[in-house]
Amino acid sequence: MKKAVLLYKKSKNIGDDIQGLAALTLLNDPETVILDRENLSQPEETEDLKLLCNGWFMDYAENWPPAKNVHPYFISFHVAKYPKIRKLMLDPKLVPYYQQFEPIGCRDHETVTLFNNIGINTYFSGCLTLTLPKSEKKRSNDIIITDLFINDILTGDYAKKVSYKLIPEKYHKYVKLRTHVRPHGNVSVADRLKDSQALLDEYAQAKLVVTSRIHCALPCLALGTPVYFLDFGYVRKSNRDRFDGILDLMHVVRPTIPFHENTRLEKIVKFFGLHRLFFPFIKKLKIDWENPLQNPTEYQQIADKIKKRVSDEFGLN
């Protein structure tokens, strides 16, 4: 039986592709089939496939569960926060389906709870991107800033201006701004993997990465690149639950950016453009820019367990 991994072939989020690339790297089999995450109920392939089923699920839950010829191994699995998606994916009618594949390996503790609530045995696995190979590349002086302000909390030139305001001026010449958001999803599989690897190569050589994206921060842990997660913009509980068990693995920094976030009051302030009046009060991030802290090492135990489980399941020894 051939091995398979997932990509969402219309995704605008390079983080989705990085998760697929991590799965491909872990299986290390040139004959691995790449399936579309959003069309698993009607895949183009008719042969039996053993699927490494990881990642964020999903935009089109009406296309769930997978077809009978797709045999999933659930690990690093996350169910999206949207009520419609959860209603479809956690329908009690699907309990017998999930029971075939117990225990379900979940990327975060929230997903563990969701499955436990319908009687499915689970465990917290962490994210597959933690298994990416550690980089041996020579470090540059680059400070990479990736998507500090997600979900359009701050946009355009002003978001860029705020990003630089958070960093001491003497380091501005080393700053590179990067994003995980493509302008469109019309990208070939080959280009998705190429773009993802190019971005990971940049992270692998950076002196420091600061981001508000999980799938920038977690790969940096694996690569050995000092990384800080910027905890900003996640004011709603539904946005924070998916971090449970993940942010514990990394350095987290909370910025001082008055009236720029998305509480109800701040939304009103931003609607009238008054948040810009508080720009002078934005403070530098509390980071040692000259000698960044090395990452915590707790992630390694999680990564080793993922590798062992996948190796045993797919016969990689």
Image (cartoon, grey):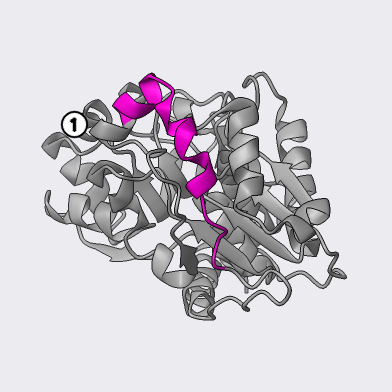
Judge whether residue 276 is colored magenta.
Answer: yes
How far from the left and from the top, in percent, is residue 49? 53, 43
Q: Is residue 150 above or below residue 122?
A: above
Task: Tell whether 225 sits left or right of 247.
Answer: right
Is there any visible trace of residue 146 in the rendered image?
Answer: no
User: Where, by quadrant of the figure, is residue 20 drawn?
Assistant: top right
- Type of secondary structure dominating the magenta stretch: helix
Task: Tell whether 11 sits left or right of 237.
Answer: right
Quadrant in which the C terminus appears:
bottom right
How far from the left and from the top, in percent, is residue 158? 60, 31
Task: Tell whether 269 sits left or right of 177.
Answer: left
How far from the left and from the top, in percent, is residue 258? 40, 45
Is there any visible trace of residue 229 in the rendered image?
Answer: yes
Residue at 36%, 56% (x, y): give it. 243
| Residue stretch rendered in magenta on the structure | 267-286
Residue at 52%, 40% (x, y): give it. 279
Q: Which residue is mark 1?
A: 87
